[in-house]
Image: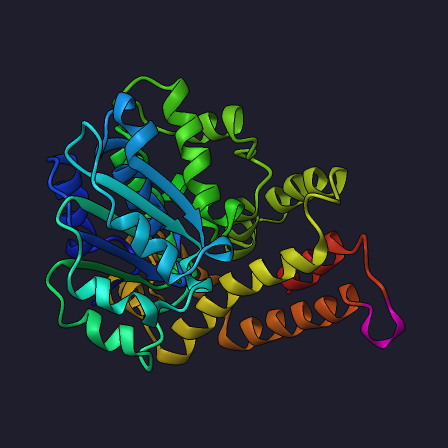
Amino acid sequence: MAKISIPDSQYAIYQREIAEGKFRSVYFLAGDEPFYGDLLAEDIEKNALNDGERDFNQVVMYGKECDAQTIQEACNKYPMMAQRMVVIVKEAHLISLDGILPYFKNPQATTVLVLVHPKKIDGRKAYAKELKKLDKVAVLNTAKLYDNQLPEFVKYRVKELGLNTDDKVAFILSEYLGNDLHRINNELKKLASVLPKGSTITSDTIEAYVGISKIYNVFELNSAILSRDMKKCATIIRGFEANPKDFPLLVLTALIYSALSKLLILHAQKITTPQAAASALKVSPFFVGEYINATKKYSYAETLRAISILRKFDRMARGIGGNKADDSLSEMVYMIIGK
């Protein structure tokens, strides 16, 4: 079974086959990250039948409304004036899949069965053990991306959509949109719909179409903190404090901690070269120079002190200890930067 984070060769094989009009008898699209399975299911739905064939030859079911017998009955029907039947089962994790094992072993030659299973495959189940042995079943088992993989995912999808971008913009988009790959993809598709093919997504682009300010964002605040630029911090903080609902202190402390914890790693491991820093921090080499420079701005002791200050304000933001901090961002940043 293929287990992928950012699309690997197995995903690419299935994607290429579908584009060429070659279809497997069964697709088992599973994993904790449903995005890639949903994408392949969408490709199959678009390409396996033409518009005139779908009414009679495509069936879409949902796991909460069907069972193994219903699925097999649909799969054993013959296509009407078309090359194949397509049966798509969404929410397949709600079905007892052991009941479909006989069909997995002997699928109908004229049917494409697509099981969209937005959960990790349970290796203890009988169907999971059999899937490994069956050549006619295409299996995808995807894992959730780690946060540090999101910028690479952004760049991958941008390229697939016929656009270009750089590491900085990919990082800003991933920080702003979070680890919901469907949300990231939807925003990128919006950009692809308004930009000419081959265009480059810039800070100006995402400010205009996604709503992420090229000045007032956490990426820029972290950069200003790492460089100990109080003037730049003050400018960014004014923008944040004008929109407190969009920039709650509790979220900001977590994101600033993410930056300072990387600085702590460099100090603790005495790392000074870009290559070693990129490996240790698991970030793009594009960003490591900023962290290496920050080790000259903050000593090891000052970094520990900054993290201690963050933790204090994080507790206050949560209301722990009887204190509730709603408008203390500027105070927190001043204390972190202050010598």
Give left or right: position of 9 versus 274.
left
Residue 114, percent from left and from top: 29, 50
Residue 41, percent from left and from top: 31, 44
Is 27 drawn above or below residue 177 in the view shown?
below
Number of numbered tags placed on the structure image: 0
**How is the protein colored in the picture?**
rainbow
One can see residue 286 in this view: no
Q: Quadrant of residue 103?
A: bottom left
Q: Pick out the residue farthest to the bottom.
A: 124
Residue 264, percent from left and from top: 47, 73
Q: Nearer the viewer, residue 232 or 4?
A: 4
Residue at position x 65%, y 57% from top? 251
Residue at position x 31%, y 40% from top? 157
Q: Which residues are magenta?
A: 319-323
Secondary structure, magenta segment, majority class: helix
Residue at position x 45%, y 26% from top? 205
Is 174 drawn above or below residue 277 in the view shown?
above
Give left or right: position of 127 versus 201.
left
Residue at position x 44%, y 42% from top? 184
Q: Quadrant of the C terminus?
A: bottom right
Give left or right: position of 231 versus 45.
right
One can see residue 50 in this view: yes
Q: Nearer the viewer, residue 35 or 79?
A: 79
Q: Quadrant of residue 274?
A: bottom left
Is 8 drawn above or below residue 318 in the view shown?
above
Q: Quadrant of the N terminus?
A: bottom left
Residue 302, percent from left and from top: 57, 72
Q: Magenta span has 107?
A: no
Q: Nearer the viewer, residue 140 or 268?
A: 140
